[in-house]
Image (cartoon, rainbow, N blue to C red):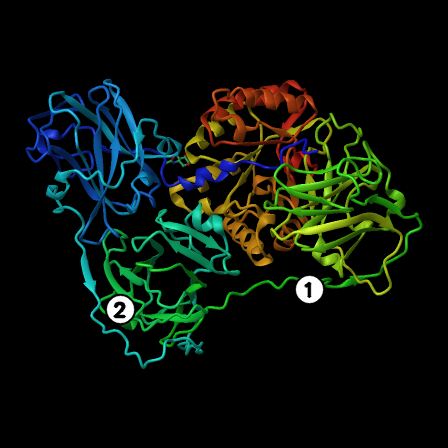
Amino acid sequence: MRTFTLIGLAAGLASTVSAACSAALKIDDFSKWSSNTNSLGEWTSDDGSMTTISATGGVLSFKPKSGSYFYETFACQAASTNGYNSVQFSVKGPSGGSLTLEIQTKTSCSATAYTSKYFTVSSLTGSTQTITVPLSSFSGANANAITAFVWSGFSSTTATWQLSSIQFGCGSSGGASSTSKPASSSVIPASSTSVKPSTSSVPTSVVVQSTSKPASTTSAPPSTLVTSTIPSGSCTPLLVDDWTSQSRLTFLFYNAMLEPTSDDGTMTSLVVGSPSANRVTLTPKGTDSYFYSQTGCLNAKNIYGGLSLRVKAPAGTTFSIQLESSSTCEVGKTVQVVQTTSQLGWTFDGTEKVYTIPFSKYTNLDTSKIVTIFFTGFTKAVSFGPLAFYCGTTGSEYIVTTTTPPAGPSSTVAAPTGTAAALVIDKFASKDSNALGFWHGGDDGMGLTWGSSKLTIKSTDSDYSFYTQVSGSCSDFSKYKDSYLHIAYSGTTAFSVALQQHNSGCNENVSPFPETWDSLEASRYAANGHIYMPMNHFNINLVRTIGIAIKGFYKTDTVALSLVEIVPSVPTGFIIPNKLESGDLVFACKRPNSFAFAIDDGDPTMAQQVMQIIKSENIKVTFFTVGAPLLDSSTNLTNVYREMQSQGHQIALHSYTHPKMEGLPDYASIDWEYNEDIKAVQKQLNGLHTPYFRPPFGTEGARMRQRLALALGEKPTITMWSVDVEDWLWAETNTPEEQLKAFQRDVDKGGSLVVMHYLYPSTVSYLKQFIQIAKATGKQLMRVDQCMMDPNAPPL
Ligand SMILES: *[C@@H]1O[C@H](CO)[C@@H](O)[C@H](O)[C@H]1NC(C)=O
């Protein structure tokens, strides 16, 4: 019964991942070959290793000897942070030929030693071809501290080879490589050790190895929590990361300070929420694996005495913690001071304890300019709790403030007795239909196990639903308004129960279908294997009831259902909680003959083109924007949306880091997404406060609705869609025109509220046609708030 797509754009984050990179970074176009200088102003040479070498018209031509090489150096490039994900170059070599590309990287830009990793480019065609090698292909290389590339291992010494257009690539083009195969680690050109890239113009750095002696074994590790002596004044601990959001950490690469953080793919995994809330488990591939968190250029001097965090690690685990400061506040020019866990006196026994990283152990660190915290050398997997700077000289733990969920009802309401007779809806006796003879079933991917008069559900995705219908069309349930939905269950209650409402024509071929639903949190209404929900807590038109959905699972624990029915009363003593505000869930415009484009943000580089098209079509639209990238000035999105605001478009909320909101584990992580987003939008967009929210991926459930209402302090409009251009499905295929067909199809079915993203050139290229198709319906195009007849919307 998934007749419209609830799973939104899987690639919705792609734009923000590469947000910092809008264009390739040219390394060399060989215009300055005669002075051995590349486009980045740095040294390039073959050190006389070739038989012949020369450059004209942007192309380097050479005839190698066995052992010849050619290299490009540059100031240490933090490629990942800067959004570059590949190295690209054009090459012409003999048909079937091959060469080896070497990358030289350091543990960080200020380290002196570099290590080399290799990649073989084979099966050359004999013509000029463009090669894209994803940086991730160089297994174990630190893509955040790249200093040189070296070409060598040329398969032919008689052919004339050509190289041109060497650059760092970004965006999706950096991810694909059709002609290259990763080299096995044994392919190491003999020449590699003789390559000595010029380091003269690489930023100078001072490496200071701390000389502090390991703490004597008699000094107890700081395993017990001590109370901080907070200096007089107003110091509060400064949180670096509380590990609340997997997407913040691994898609957007922001810590709680909104500074870059990443493992650059060096870890096997990085899992937020494991082993418990506000924890991250780091599983290293090897001792080269690392994880860093930047801190801006923090002045901690005379304010913070160090950092603290909880760590859980098996006995015998060691790793090192490097703190970096920079007199110029540049991540590439740092003083690094390393302390190993043994030097810090840390020991582990498999249980979680609080540990401190006191600056007093970091001689020569300039605590007035701290730029990076860098962890490496892990001998085993570890988990970290909240990482924070502590006030004063005595280490103390950062306590995460959590919003305590109401344990069951937060207040209760009377349980009146209905007058309608009981109605058994589902006894799970048959897989094909329920007790009313209507369809029941789950979304593809949902784990359903049918037992004897029992259904066990295991859902690994908050998008999945199980449905049981009460009608093939509209069923008038108004007689049950004082009755209760009763569900007998065993197992988890970490899901929502939704009651769905049909469209006004009771016609499933008209979009939207369903028209809306309301979701209640199972756990609030559950006790001892029974859920009783007052029918009047479902804010829908009961006259057009279609069915019930069990959805929005936020744990993978199973629930077994044995009965779904409507009953006139609850057992004596059963406590009914108050109804919480859950907002309006809208799929279509409410104003007669209106139509709204609601566009989710995407690739900042396409924003100008989108604005131009909308301007030339003279319509007003609504943009749903993700909060975190607004705060990243390199995306330019704040300027873009301010301009759109000034042109009369509506700007609205789309979460802070784009997770599936209902899939988040607890209220605290849901609240964080909303509160940070609301703050970001308010700060960046002229104090804007709006109740319009579009759920990332269209993922909906009771918790995300109720927490949104709380965070906003008003009733939200949760804006779904009834016209989907399906850009997430078609934009990058060889039939991108399917987007036009999808748009036309949904418009023909009566849809009036669009979802699309400006992530792909093909989607943007159809925008004018989308608008013209919408105009051809005779409907009036407007902002979402206008089409909802919101009294606060600007006049038409
Ligand atoms: C940033 O956006 C503003 C507003 O649309 C635009 O005028 C400006 O050219 C953009 N800047 C860049 C560097 O793209």
Q: Is residue 457 left or right of residue 123?
A: right
Q: Position of residue 579 (x, y in %)?
A: 75, 55
Residue shown at 41% from the left, 79% from the top: 229
Quarter placement of the N terminus? top right
Q: Earlier in the sequence, mark 1 or mark 2?
A: 2
- Label 1: few (<14), some (14–19) or many (≥20) C-alpha neighbours in 10 Å: few
Residue shown at 80% from the left, 39% from the top: 434
Amino acid beneath label 2: Tyr
Q: Quadrant of ligand 1?
A: top left
Image mark for residue 407: 1
In the depicted structure, whether residue 727 falls above or below residue 265: above
Q: Is residue 558 left or right of residue 379?
A: right
Residue shown at 77% from the left, 47% from the top: 538
Quarter placement of the C terminus? top right
Element type where label 2 sits in the image: loop
Amino acid beneath label 1: Ala
Q: Is mark 2 within 8 Å of ligand 1?
A: no
Disc 1 from disc 2: Cα separation: 45 Å
Q: Give 594 or 191, whichever is nearer the viewer.
A: 191
The residue identified by callout 2 is 362
